Image: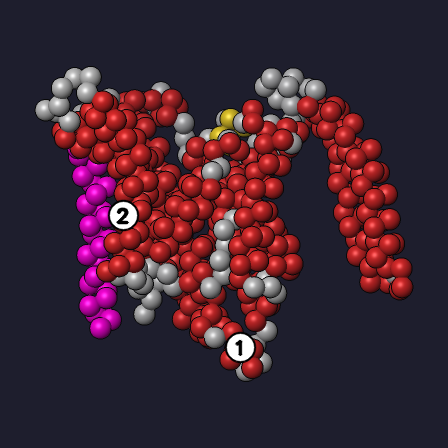
Amino acid sequence: MSDRVDLRAVGLFGLVALLFVGTGILQSWNVALTILNMGLISAIMALGVNMQWGYAGLFNVGIMGFVALGGLGAVLVSMPPDTEAIAAGGGRVLGGLLLGAVTIIAAIFAWRRGGRHAGWLMVAVLIAGFFLYRAMLDPGVEAIEAVSPANRGSIGGLGLPVLLSWPVGGLLAAGAAWVIGKTALGLRSDYLAIATLGIAEIIIAMMKNEDWLARGVKNVIGVPRPVPYEVDLQRTQSFQDLAARFGADTVTASAIAVKLAYAGLFAVVLLILIWLTQAALASPWGRMMRAIRDNEVAAEAMGKDVTRRHLQIFVLGSAVLGLAGAMMVTFDGQLTPTSYQPLRYTFLIWVMVIVGGSGNNWGAVLGGFLIWWLWVEVEPLGVLLMQGITAGMAEGSWLKSHLLDAAAHMRLLTMGVILLLVLRFSPRGLLPEK
C-alpha cells in the first residue's frame, strides 16, 4: 500500500513539474520561474495551515492576518531607519506603546486582586490608561507622519539583513497567534474561526491606517533583497560572457538568474520545513496531536492537556504562515496592505490543503504548487478557450461579448470545479494521510 501511495506521489509531483516546464517552453521561462517562486511560498503557507488543521483539527480562517504580519516584520527589520522621523516622534510613540502595555498589565492585576470591586476597578484602569495612552501616542504619530508624507512618513526599520527578517516575521505572527489562542482555543472550534477572522481584519485595518508604522496604503517599496539586482548583473562582465555563451540577451538572462536564486532560497526553506514537520509527525508528539484531533475527550481522559497542545500547534502553524509572508514581501520588493484579500490568502490556501491532502505534509506542498499554477494560468487559458468558442459568432453579438467578458472569472469557476471533483472522487485529497 505504501509503495502504491509513493508511486502516486511521484507521479503527481511529476505531472506538476511538467506543467511548469510546459509553461517555460510555451510562454517563457521568466513566467514559469515567477509562478514557481510564488508556488514555493504558497506551499509553505499550505504547510502551516496543514499543521493546524491536519495535525490538530484547528479551523483557522485568519490566514491573511498572519501572512500580513510576516510581511510587516520583513519591513520593520530590513528597511533602513528614518532617523528624522524617529527623532520627531519616536520617543512619544514608544512611550505610548509602553503605557498601553502597562495599562493592560494593571487591568489584569486589578481584575485578579481587586476583590469585590474588581470589575469596576479594571474598567477604571482601562479608561484612564486609554486616555493617557492616546495623549502620549497621538502627538508622536502626527510628528512622524508629517516628515515628508509623500515618500516617507514612517519610522522605517532596523536596517538589518533581509534574511533575518524572515524568522522575525514568523515570530511576529506566532506572538499574535499566542494572544488569540490564549483567549479562543479553550472554546468551540467555530469560536476560533470567528476570532481568527476578526483578528485578521483588525490586523489589515491597522496596517492600512497606521502610516507611521509602514506607510499604510501608500505602501512600502524598495524592500532590500537577498539576491543581486538585475541591473547589477547586466553590468558584470562575467555575467555578460555567461549570457553570450548560452545565446541569451543579458536582460532576459539576468531576470532568469535572479528568479533562480530566489527559487533556490525558497526551496531550501521549504525542504527544511518539510524535514522538521515530517520528523514531528512521526514522533510521539505527532502521534499525540493526531490522537487529540481524532478524539479530544479520550485524549483528555488519558491526561493530555488538550488546550495547551492546541496552543502549541496553533502558534507553530502561524509562525510558518508569518515566515511565508515575510518571504513573499521580500520577493515582491514591496508591502501593499490593500493586496491582502481573504480570497487569495485564506480561501485559496484552504483549497491547496484540501486538494493536496489534509494531514499529509507532502500533499499540502503538492496542493500549493498545483493550485497556484492553476490560479495564475487558468485566466489566460480561459481567454483562449472563449476566443475559440466564439470564433464563429458574429461580431458585436451580445453572447460573444458576454462569454469573452466572463473569461476573466474562469479561475473562480475552475477552483470550484476542482474542489468539487476532488471531494467527490478523492475526499481525503490527492495524497491522503496515511
Q: Magenta stretch: give its range.
A: 1-30
Is 317 rendered above or below residue 236? below
Left/right placement of residue 215 relative to residue 340 reads right
* Mark with earlier residue (1, 2): 1
Residue 178 screen position, x and y as percent: 61, 56
Residue displayed at 56% across by 82% down: 301
Number of residues whose C-alpha sits closer than 10 Å to that of mark 1, classed few (under 14), some (14–19) or many (20 or more): few
Q: Are marks 1 and 2 in contact (CB under 8 Å)?
A: no
Displayed quadrant of residue 423: bottom left
Residue 360: mark in rendering:
none
User: Is residue 144 at all visible to an observer of this figure?
Assistant: yes
Real-space Cα distance between discs 1 and 2?
Answer: 36 Å
Residue name at image x 86 percent, y 48 percent: 124
Q: Is residue 174 magenta?
A: no
User: Where the N terminus falls, by quadrant?
Assistant: bottom left
* Whether residue 44 can be seen here: no
Question: Which residue is under mark 2?
Answer: 417
77 lies above or below 242: below
> Element at badge 2?
helix
The residue under the point 20% across, 24% down is 400
Q: Nearer the viewer, residue 393 or 380?
A: 393
Instruction: Say left or right for 375 vs 70.
Output: left
Three-letter amino acid code at the position of disc 2: Val
Q: Nearer the viewer, mark 1 or mark 2?
A: 2
Q: Which residue is mark 1?
A: 297
Q: Which SS does the magenta portion mostly show?
A: helix
Which residue: 84% across, 57% down? 119
Decide which of 132, 383 is in the foreground and name it.
Answer: 383
